Image: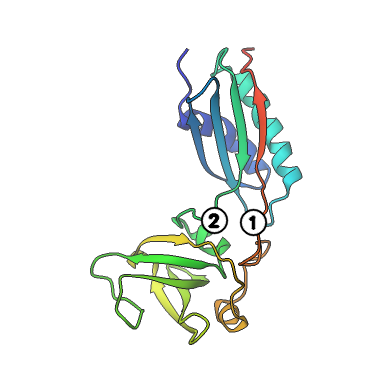
Amino acid sequence: MPMPTEERVSQLVAGLVERRGFDLEGVEISTAGPQAGVKVVVDSDAAVELDAIAELSNEISETLDTAGDFGETAYLLEITTPGINRPLTADRHWRRAQGRKVRIKLRPGADSPDPSGAARFEARIGTLDGAVIAVVLGGRAKPHLVTIPLADIAEAVVQVEFNQPSPAELELAGGIAAGKPQPGAAPEDLSSESESEGIVE
């Protein structure tokens, strides 16, 4: 029996994810090994609790089993939140990453706010105002706030930090997004896995 597509699984689980107060960030299906892997990535403006992830995992598992798209194929379901290096592609991603350090690549021809004129640079994410994002340049030594139109950004990826930022940087950035961990802190593992045999009803 053919495997369901990622689009099909997204359609099956989108309503459950939304009712739990999450955004569905993506679905990945892998077929390597003796069983299939189904990874559902969710996120939220508020802090994500492990209990809520576990409850959502149970609901999604029941929904997939009832739909029967996997037939007799065993699958391992994983519900998780986005990794720290997830590209920022939507407004909500920028809001939730406020206070984080980000590696930015500008589109060709875009004016660089970096003093060197570089098209690639690191900054700390500030507040989002419509189609413009405020970022803090200069690091600990000379932090200062600039703005960049989102349309000028070709790629932005949050960077892993091992040290906490300076208070001056965080103040200019407007603090850390509510419910999100402090930069430099060890990330909490919020993934939940459950194994199902893909029962056909």
**Residue position marked by numbered label 1 in the rendering:** 187
Residue at 39%, 73% in the rendered image = 148
Asked whether, in this view, residue 143 is left or right of residue 155, the answer is right
Q: Residue at 55% across / 21% down in the picture?
A: 35
Estimate how packed mark 2 is, as few (under 14), some (14 to 19) or many (20 or more) residues with alpha carbons within 10 Å: some
Distance, label 1 to label 2, CA atoms, is 8 Å
Residue 58 image offset from top left, x and y in percent: 71, 31
Q: Position of residue 20 (x, y in %)?
A: 68, 43
**In the figure, 25 relative to 30: above or below?**
below
Quarter of the figure that contains the C terminus: top right
Q: Quadrant of residue 194?
A: top right
Kindly identify the amino acid type of the residue bearing the numbered disc 1.
Pro
Task: Identify the amino acid type marked 2.
Answer: Ile
- Residue extending farthest to the bottom is 142
Q: Earlier in the sequence, mark 1 or mark 2?
A: 2
For numbered disc 1, what is the local secondary structure? Answer: loop
Which residue appears farthest toward the front when viewing the image?
A: 162
Which residue is rendered at x = 29% and y = 78% of the image? 117
Where, by quadrant of the figure, is residue 153 drawn?
bottom left
Residue topped by disc 2:
84
Tag on residue 19? none
Look at the picture and state if 136 lies above or below 107: below
Q: Residue 53, relative to residue 113: is it above or below?
A: above
State the residue in front, 22 or 144.
144
Q: Residue drawn 45% across and 59% down?
A: 157
